[in-house]
């Protein structure tokens, strides 16, 4: 067989279980540090984000009603599929500037983290719920519920592990998410969307956009139908913007300042709690 | 009816209609024009509740909403009317006193139209007596599809006679008329027989108002106007829940009938959830921030 023409991948957005191009028709030319490959990446717009929020809101009730056990299974499945895509992630991570060794470590950690959170799915509520002592004939207990729709700004410096570390604790707790991928390393996030897409995650539960953080941050943090915003980064001005915009509808700002995401302490049940709401119920006893 | 016989023989070019709809719907309305359109839409809404489980409480709640759409924006126009079932007319009438909002009632065995003419006229007389400002009647689709146009026309004429001065909207229930040709014939039939408005659907049959059907009806209104000089109103109803779609319909009206029809006297939307979406879009235009349904009333 003769040499055939190279078939290159188009990196699109991931909204509502589909892979559309950006409605704005804008693209960013992305080139790897060694200048061997040139890729068109969608420059997502505020309208793409708006559409993603509509999808996430629609998916929220169904996803939060899934049994914790089922959500755990699905997270585990994401881990399985990611394992099967190892080669592709190796290529993309090295293209994005990692050495082979770093890439392998990152993929291992990402899979491990997914399995880790899958395990927590049906346990965090037991561990962090409690019966409260009250001085009246009431049975008073507090337990955790998902906050709803979460907008997340993924860390810029680590793409695959960053996406996994941000998304897993959000969705394992029954939230739905819209994530803005790393601006400088966008490839892995979209390929990770393909992994999610083939892992029985219902449409709209995870939505991933690529684009410019400076352009989209304002909309991510100000949308009234978003219940929490997770920000990963170290820019004081951006953090201030996120915090003040959050006040608009009292959405919860979760700020991760310049964290090292490969650190073991960046996984744990407390990350799930960041996007959980405590609900306390009074129930009469002895009647 | 004979005077307009030529209008009955014109058939509809379906492919052309679809293309024209696609072209009109690709228009983009932004900024001040969008705000103006949204305000206009609000003033054209017939806030509707037509469910078997309707209660006086629900009708009162809807009337309150009609009069106080969104207190954060006192300059917003009120909706045009509240549309209810006949037994709810007195409740709505009382709740809307001194608001300038009209009360519309469905009648003539809504939604099926399956009843005797005498019973239908009785019902119309009752709602007019109860103080309804507008009557939304349904045509007998069975008779229409059997080709008994005269009977259908006569029915409409008799209802109009019973209505006297009260505004009559004739519901064609286009979802049951099968072809676009039938939609055109039914539109002309209704206008000839004395309809003040023609309305697409009851909202109980799927599909309800679709863009091609609305375009056909608007064109029939235009042709009727050119022949007789009478301006007949149009009301798409059912399934219009997003402001964006409503704006697109306004574009269609403007391009087919002209500026004159862009007022609540000649154009209405029959909808229950459209008002909330329009309010959300208006709020978005003012604040610059995308809104959540959490901050708007449920019904």
Image (cartoon, rainbow, N blue to C red):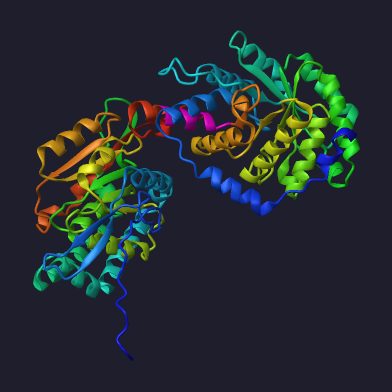
Q: Which residues are magenta?
A: B272-282
Q: Position of residue A226 (x, y in %)?
A: 32, 39
Q: Position of residue A170 (x, y in %)?
A: 27, 49
Residue B134 belongs to the span the image colors magenta: no
Residue that sits furthest to the bottom in the current view: A1
Q: Is residue A100 above or below residue B288?
A: below
**Total numbered labels:** 0
Q: Is residue B264 above or below residue B215?
A: above
Q: Position of residue A281 (x, y in %)?
A: 35, 33
Front residue of B233 and B23: B23
Front residue of B230 and B134: B230
Q: Quadrant of residue B236?
A: top right
Point 40% across, 18% down: residue: B72
Q: Is residue B48 left or right of residue A161?
A: right
Q: Is residue B227 left or right of residue B254?
A: right
Residue B277 belongs to the span the image colors magenta: yes
Point 30% across, 54% down: residue: A122
Q: Main secondary structure of the magenta part?
A: helix
Q: Quadrant of residue B212?
A: top right
Q: Say whether residue B76 is visible.
A: yes
Point 13% across, 53% down: residue: A266
Q: Say whether residue B201 is visible.
A: no
Residue that sits furthest to the top in the current view: B98
Point 39% across, 52% down: residue: A204
Q: Quadrant of the N terminus of chain B?
A: top right
Q: Is residue A271 above or below residue B153?
A: below
Q: Is residue A182 left or right of residue A178?
A: left
Q: Is residue A76 above or below residue B205?
A: below
Q: Position of residue B276 (x, y in %)?
A: 49, 30
């Amino acid at each position: 067989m003769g040499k055939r023409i190279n078939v290159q991948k188009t990196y699109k957005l991931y909204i509502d279980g589909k892979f559309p191009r950006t409605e704005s028709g804008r693209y960013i030319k992305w080139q790897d540090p060694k200048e061997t490959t040139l890729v068109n990446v969608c420059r997502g717009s505020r309208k793409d984000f708006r559409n993603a929020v509509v999808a996430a809101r629609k998916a929220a009730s169904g996803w939060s009603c899934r049994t914790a056990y089922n959500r755990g299974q699905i997270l585990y499945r994401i881990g399985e599929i990611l394992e099967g895509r190892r080669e592709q992630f190796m290529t993309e991570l090295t293209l994005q500037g990692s050495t082979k060794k770093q890439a392998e470590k990152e993929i291992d950690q990402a899979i491990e983290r997914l399995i880790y959170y899958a395990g927590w799915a049906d346990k965090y509520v037991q561990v962090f719920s409690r019966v409260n002592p009250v001085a009246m004939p009431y049975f008073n207990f507090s337990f955790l519920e998902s906050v709803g729709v979460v907008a997340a700004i993924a860390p810029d410096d680590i793409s695959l592990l960053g996406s996994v570390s941000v998304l897993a604790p959000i969705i394992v707790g029954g939230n739905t998410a819209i994530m803005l991928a790393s601006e400088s390393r966008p490839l892995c996030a979209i390929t990770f969307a393909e992994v999610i897409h083939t892992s029985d995650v219902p449409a709209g539960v995870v939505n991933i956009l690529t684009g410019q953080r400076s352009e989209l941050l304002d909309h991510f943090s100000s949308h009234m139908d978003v219940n929490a915003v997770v920000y990963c980064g170290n820019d004081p001005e951006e953090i201030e913007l996120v915090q003040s915009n959050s006040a608009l509808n009292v959405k919860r700002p979760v700020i991760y300042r310049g964290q090292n995401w490969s650190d073991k302490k960046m996984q744990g049940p407390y990350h799930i709690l960041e996007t959980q709401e405590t609900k306390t119920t009074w129930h009469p006893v002895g009647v | 009816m004979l005077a307009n016989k030529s209008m009955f023989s014109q058939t509809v070019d379906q492919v052309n209609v679809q293309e024209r709809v696609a072209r009109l719907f690709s228009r983009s309305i932004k900024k001040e024009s969008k705000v103006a359109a949204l305000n206009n839409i609000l003033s054209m809404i017939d806030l509707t509740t037509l469910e078997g489980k309707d209660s006086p409480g629900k009708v009162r709640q809807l009337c309150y909403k009609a009069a106080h759409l969104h207190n954060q924006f006192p300059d917003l126009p009120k909706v045009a009317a509240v549309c209810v079932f006949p037994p709810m007319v007195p409740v709505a009438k009382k709740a809307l006193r001194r608001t300038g909002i009209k009360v519309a009632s469905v009648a003539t065995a809504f939604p099926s139209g399956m009843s005797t003419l005498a019973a239908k006229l009785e019902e119309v007389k009752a709602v007019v007596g109860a103080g309804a400002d507008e009557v939304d009647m349904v045509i007998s689709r069975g008779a229409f599809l059997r080709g008994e146009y005269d009977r259908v026309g006569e029915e409409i004429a008799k209802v109009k006679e019973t209505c006297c001065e009260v505004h009559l909207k004739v519901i064609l229930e286009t979802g049951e008329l099968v072809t676009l040709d039938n939609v055109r014939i039914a539109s002309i039939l209704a206008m000839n027989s004395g309809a003040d408005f023609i309305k697409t659907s009851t909202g109980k049959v799927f599909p309800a108002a679709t863009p091609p059907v609305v375009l056909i009806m608007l064109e029939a209104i235009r042709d009727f106007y050119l022949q007789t000089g009478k301006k007949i109103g149009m009301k798409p109803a059912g399934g219009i829940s997003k402001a964006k779609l409503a704006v697109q319909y306004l574009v269609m009206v403007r391009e087919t009938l002209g500026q004159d029809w862009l007022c609540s006297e000649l154009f209405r939307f029959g909808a229950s959830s459209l008002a909330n979406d329009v309010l959300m879009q208006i709020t978005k235009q003012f604040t610059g921030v995308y809104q959540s349904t959490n901050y708007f009333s449920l019904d």
